[in-house]
Image: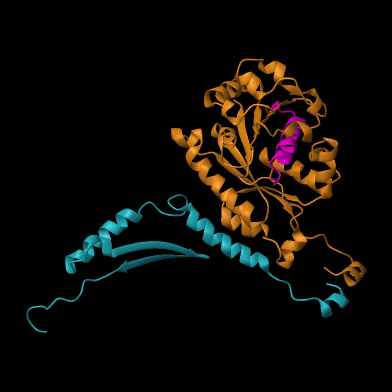
Amino acid sequence: MGLFESFFRTPPSKSAAMAKERLQIIVAHERGGRRGSPDYLPALKKELLEVVRKYVPVDPSQIKVHLDREGDYEILELNITLPDEEPRSGRG
Amino acid sequence: MATVIVVTSGKGGVGKTTTSASFATGLAQRGYRTAVIDFDVGLRNLDLIMGCERRVVYDFINVINGEANLNQALIRDKHVENLYILPASQTRDKEALTKEGVERVLDDLRQSFEYIVCDSPAGIERGALMALYFADEAMVVTNPEVSSVRDSDRILGILASRSRRAEQGDPPVKEHLVLSRYAPERADRGDMLSVEDVLEILGIPLLGVIPESPTVLQSSNAGVPVILEEGSDAGAAYGDLVDRFLGKNLPHRFITPPKKGFLKRLFSGG
């Protein structure tokens, strides 16, 4: 960088970083069931549901499995809506 | 056994035809019998880029329809030996590209050529799908720019699901990334996606980086594939790309900004 410019130039915009981040998100989303998104998700969901139902009676529609990617991380999100607490027998 | 290579991208204007012309010319220069086919029915341009537009008599669709035989339609390149061009039809519509017809022409070409380069049209419609369907390898031409990268990813999905290799469960189409119109100094400044950024997003092997260069326009003006401009950056980059495709292990050039002398740095900035 020239002497003159080093004093007066506005800082670089780094717009490439924005481009990369936006692309990573949209590309991961559009890949859907293709590359990147593992095909074990449905089976995983089914088994998880069975385990949970051993202990709590949940409706199959109340479990959501979602795989997300942020940079180098993959996030497996499991969301189970438990039914309203019912009065139990025995000690309260 | 001939190898069929599709040059594709999804997005238009990224350098598919420029790449097809230079890649095919480079293969022929190195002694391989090569045919290059324009799949852009209705918007043919490969003939213009390769400087043979005035010698087109019959085209790809004529051959598919049996109105001409392959030898009548193939145009012998005037720059290098071993290279033939099969132009697209300018008057028919894309529906004339039938899977059976394309397969028949490719099978005929396989008899006498070692490499068959298919220059795909932009988009993901019939012409593009036919260009990639029979491919053994694919060059995905991408610019360091968001819409081009996104479209390239889309094309990679189509290669993985709708090519003949995918449909028949054969080994997948071999993918190569060609990053074109690259400006290293802008990438260094953080104004342009870098080689690494694009590689990280698309996740396919890099075959070549073609620097942004005024020579590309000059050579298309003249109808001479830019690979023949050996003194230019872009020409040299295409030369390396062809050598790499043929198995040479060459380092990537033109991916870092040229070094400037002290005085130039002091007065020009950048």
Residue B15 is covered by the magenta coloring: yes
User: Residue drawn at (7%, 81%), measured in percent from left and top?
Assistant: A90
Quarter of the picture containing the C terminus of chain A is bottom left
Q: Which residues are magenta?
A: B13-35
Q: Is residue B54 above or below residue B261?
A: above
The quadrant of the image that shows the N terminus of chain A is bottom right
Residue B247 appears at what percent x and percent y? 66, 40
Which residue is at 57% across, 60% downward?
A: A23
Magenta: main secondary structure: helix
> Which residue reaches farthest left?
A90
Q: Position of residue A52 (x, y in %)?
A: 22, 66
- Above/below status of A69 relative to B8: below
Instruction: Give the percent coordinates (x, y) of residue B194.
Output: 67, 60
Residue A16 seen in this snapshot = yes
Q: How many callouts does the rendering have?
A: 0
The chain coloured cyan in the image: A
Asked whether, in this view, residue B128 is left or right of residue B261, the answer is: left
Q: Is residue B171 visible?
A: no
Question: As drawn, is A59 to the left or to the right of B207?
Answer: left
| Rendering colour (chain B) | orange
Q: Which residue sits at x=32%, y=68%?
A: A79
